[in-house]
Amino acid sequence: MDKFLLGCSFLLLVITSVRCFYNKKKTHLDVFLNISLISLLLNSSILYLFYVDKLKDYIHLYRLGTLFTFTFISASFLYIKYALSKAKLSSIDFIAFLPALIYLIDYAPFFFSTAEYKLACFEKDMNNSTLNLHQQSWFIPNGFHFILQNGLGVSFTLYQFFLIGKTVYKGGTSYLKENRMVLIWFLIWSSLLFLSCFPDLIFGLTGNKINITNYTVITPCILLYFWFPFSILLTPDLLYGVKGFWLQKQRAFISKVENHDPSHETGAHIEVGDILNHSTALLREVKSKYRASDEVINPETIDGSKKAYYDAGKAENMKKSIDEYMTFSKAYLNENLSIQELAENVNLSSRQVSSLLNSYAGVNFKDYVNSFRINDFIAHYKKNPEARLKTLEHLSKEFGFNSRFTFLHAFKKMTGKTPSTFFNTTLD
């Protein structure tokens, strides 16, 4: 088992290093995935030291395993949640890390104590079989963190099952067909985490005897430390979430009707029947106008919570039409180009363009437009030596930037270098 643990730790180290240091893309999905990997790596390393009876030689790691378990459970939950829907990050979701913060505060005195004190606590826990009672707690009752960590794992996995079912229902046949492998992977992952936490939760709540030593060492190793990195290695594409994108539909025509004052057209003195007739006609007009855009939903749905799923094929065609328009029209040279203007010229709604760029292409509108400006600038600068005699401020305005500062910021963000450094290494 010690060799197996060591192998899992090595595999996690390789995958974590690649994801954290060589993957330049850092969306919130990547951040949550990286936190999950780092937490699992540290947890498996501590468990390996415990299994080979070497943890006392690195006694300052004692009790950190629970902290990494908390962060792993929370980060993997948020990763799955946002990978399913590609929704925008919500600040309220960081409450998921509250148990880890509570644990960190509760154990702060212990973490800053001497090695001799930690070693004495460790040996006492081993001799009295009180490892899971977390007796070094500062203000939380003994055993609470053990129950909380496993309860958190069970609760989050059950909610993940609900989210998967809810998302499949909303996405429909195209979502299920296109993302079948992603969904299967998330179901397996959620099931394994549930199986790892549920027996320990029952033990913590009821005290029913389980061979805790074997269970806490063997089962998580087989189900967690191996499966997670191995599945990433085999199917890396699955970790970028669903292939298409979601569009949050809105109640545009409803708000238009609600804010519309019929007195502008019918006069100040209007009868009830006139109001009803006017409102009905306006509903028909606005509903007909917005039906083709996929931006508006039925008037009965007033909560604005419905979503539409666009599969990868349709998303790619939409993205291609936007790219072609930008390339051939050079609309990006207009420093005041808006997403509304772009959407109108490609026969899409602004919400479609925004969701497509953010959820499917992984870039916001500003960076998308700037990428065309920078690429055009680089090609022009290399091809025309006389351009090198002009100031950057003058050139930046030619390519749609409203200031030298925004140009330099966009250039470095895209290339990772300043213009002078970039062209010193690329020009002959």
Image (tube, rainbow, N blue to C red):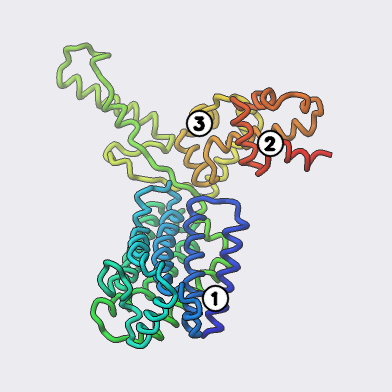
Task: Give the Cα distance between marks 2 and 1.
Answer: 43 Å
Residue drawn at the location 42% of the way across and 78% of the way down: 116
The answer to whether residue 74 is seen in the rendering is: yes
Please state if 95 lies on the left or on the right of 40 as rendered.
left
Residues under numbered marks 3 and 1 in contact, where contact means CB atoms less than 8 Å apart: no
Q: In the depicted view, which residue is nearer to us: 217 or 279?
A: 217
The reply to whether callout 2 and callout 1 are in contact (CB within 8 Å) is: no
The residue depicted at 47 percent of the width and 63 percent of the height is 36
Question: Can you see residue 162?
Answer: no
Query: In terms of image quadrants, where is residue 104?
Result: bottom left
Q: How many labels does the image show?
A: 3
Q: The disc labelled 2 sits on which kind of residue?
A: Asn
Above-or-below relation of 43 to 355? below
In this image, 383 relative to 338: left or right? Answer: right
Which residue is disc 3 drawn over? 339
Amino acid type at image mark 1:
Cys
Of the numbered discs 2 and 1, the one sitting upstream in the chain is 1
Of the two numbered discs 3 and 2 in the rendering, the one whose residue sits closer to the viewer: 2
| Residue contact at pointers 3 and 2, CB within 8 angstroms | no
N-term mark: 3 or 2: 3
Residue that label 1 marks: 8
Look at the picture and state if 42 lies above or below 410.
below
Position above or below: 40 against 348: below
Of the residues tagged 2 and 1, which is closer to the observer? Answer: 1
Kindly give the residue lying farthest to the right in the view shown.
428
CA gap, disc 3 to disc 1? 47 Å
- Label 2 packing within 10 angstroms: few (<14), some (14-19), many (20+): some
Q: Position of residue 387 (x, y in %)?
A: 77, 26
